[in-house]
Amino acid sequence: MSSVGKGVATGSIGIIMQSRGFKVTAIKADPYINVDAGTMNPTEHGEVFVTDDGDETDQDIGNYERFLDESILSVNYMTTGRVYQEVISRERNLEYKGKCVEVVPHIPQEIIRRIKEAQRISKAEITVIEIGGTVGEYQNILFLEAARMLKNEHPEDVTLMLVSFLPIPSKIGEMKTKPTQTAVRQMNAVGLQPDFVIARASKPLDAVRRQKLAQFCSIPEDHVISAPDADHIYSVPVSFEKENLSNKILKQLHLTARKVSDAQSPLFQMKKLVRTIHSAKKTVKIGIVGKYFNTGEFTLADSYISVLEALKHASWHFKHKPELVWLDAEAYENDPKKLKELADFDGILIPGGFGSRGVEGKIKVIQYVRENNIPYFGLCYGMQLAAVEAARNIGGLKGANTVEIDENPRHPIIIVNPNQQKNITEKHYGGTLRLGSYDCKLVAGTKTQTAYGVNKVAERHRHRYEFNNAYIARLEKTGLIVSGVNPQQNLVEIMERKDHPWFVGTQFHPEFLSRPLSPHPLFVGFVNAAIKRQKTKNKPKKK
């Protein structure tokens, strides 16, 4: 089922194989007809993760990057739509030389070609491939057929794993194996037999359930890997290795481990991080103001997964536990009195987003944190709205707005990227934003330049609108200064306030480059300011 932990399992397998001395990469195969994830609603699909080379991908690519600690390129991401698009394009170009082009074998062959190409480009010795969706679904059967063909072509070089959920009905209290047995039979029906079953459950697997799965799924007992719920995802590779999983995979793939020192072992470093996480006693309270939270009666944290992980990485850097609280932007539009609750937080973050819903609430939040010296971090839309707020409430520019909300505002503070105007006019939205990695030249002595410790960086983007440079001088009079610029196109990348403990907005998405073992400098700066505020806020007043 969705969100059972396939992406985390994939990343965890990657890191334990890295720690045995192998170059590893990871691939996501998504069953959607969408060519990429860019046009999917975050409340349905989760976060859209952007790669260095500008691909809009599934959030699991972000998981792979955080676990493997390296950039994953667009070649490592495929969808059904992307695969079909390539096959049809090749057919139109007569590359099949007059053959009848069929779903089988040509679609699975294209999937296999992409797998081998990704492995070649990344120079990986081991490639971990995640097939999205659920076993038995019609839409991923062609990926399963590709797996069958690949296994048949390379029987000693391919191992198959099933990540399956074992429910424990609350009124019964017994872990049930039958759904996993059924899933294995469904794999068998398409010609696949798993070599391992990763048994996801709320509790560790017991001997009885392990024996039953081995018997009915036709695998050795020690190939049933217990994967209980964890407090955080970074303990999963440690849990896997307690089951000696890397040695079992090496044996299955006929490989011999290489010697790796503790200093070079990602797993050893992850174990140190896990100890830090478990020993952290102090907390830092961060409010996240957004709108992609609710799906029915439930909250979808996956909409902002990279932001949440980046906040965790920075908090753990200071040996603090992050207390992350969802704040609905629309609530502040409807009831401005609620703004007073923001004073209870150590820091406030507004992530990226699109559209008009909740915008006025976000602007009210920005005004409150600015006036009350609460550390603020605005990402993409969060920077743009900070500029609008300053123009309206300090600069006296009535009618200041972003053209995303008002097509003809009196003061267009945020405008369409000139390179995107034609796309919007013609209603071409997929893959047309400013995407991928762009250079940013930093202004010496600013908070952001101090945080980075360098004068130039490259950060990832995903947006269609830009700050209007015609308003730079007027906004600088309000105390909001430009501290980072893209030198190639003279586009504003970072804005910050001089007279504030931490008030920084970025046009880019720094969360995409944060890793558990190397947190992003701007998130470190933000959390550091939040911890300082906490100390000041809680300091007893002199009588």
Image: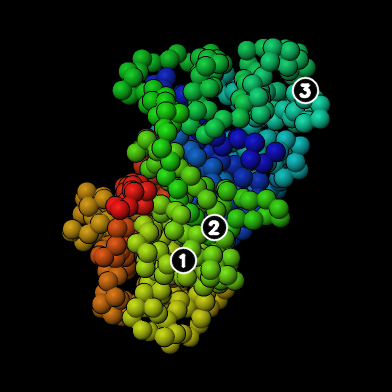
| Residue underneath mark 3 | 174
Image location of residue 71, percent across then percent down: 40, 42
Asked if one can make out residue 518 in the rendered structure from this viewpoint, the answer is no
Q: Which amino acid does the dot numbered 3 rest on?
A: Glu
Tag 2's secondary structure?
strand
Q: Tell me the mark number nearer the camera, choosing from 2 and 3.
A: 2
Q: Is residue 511 left or right of residue 96?
A: left
Compared with residue 236, is residue 410 higher up or lower down, i.e. above or below? below
| Residue underneath mark 1 | 365
Compared with residue 293, is residue 518 higher up or lower down, i.e. above or below? above
Work out how far the residue at label 1 is from the one at label 2, CA to CA, in angstroms.
10 Å
Residue at image location 18% in from the left, 58% down from the top: 445
Residue at image location 53% in from the left, 70% down from the top: 336
Image location of residue 14, percent across then percent down: 48, 29
Image location of residue 471, percent across then percent down: 31, 79
Residue at image location 27% in from the left, 71% down from the top: 479
Q: Which amino acid does the dot numbered 2 rest on?
A: Leu
| Residue underneath mark 2 | 327
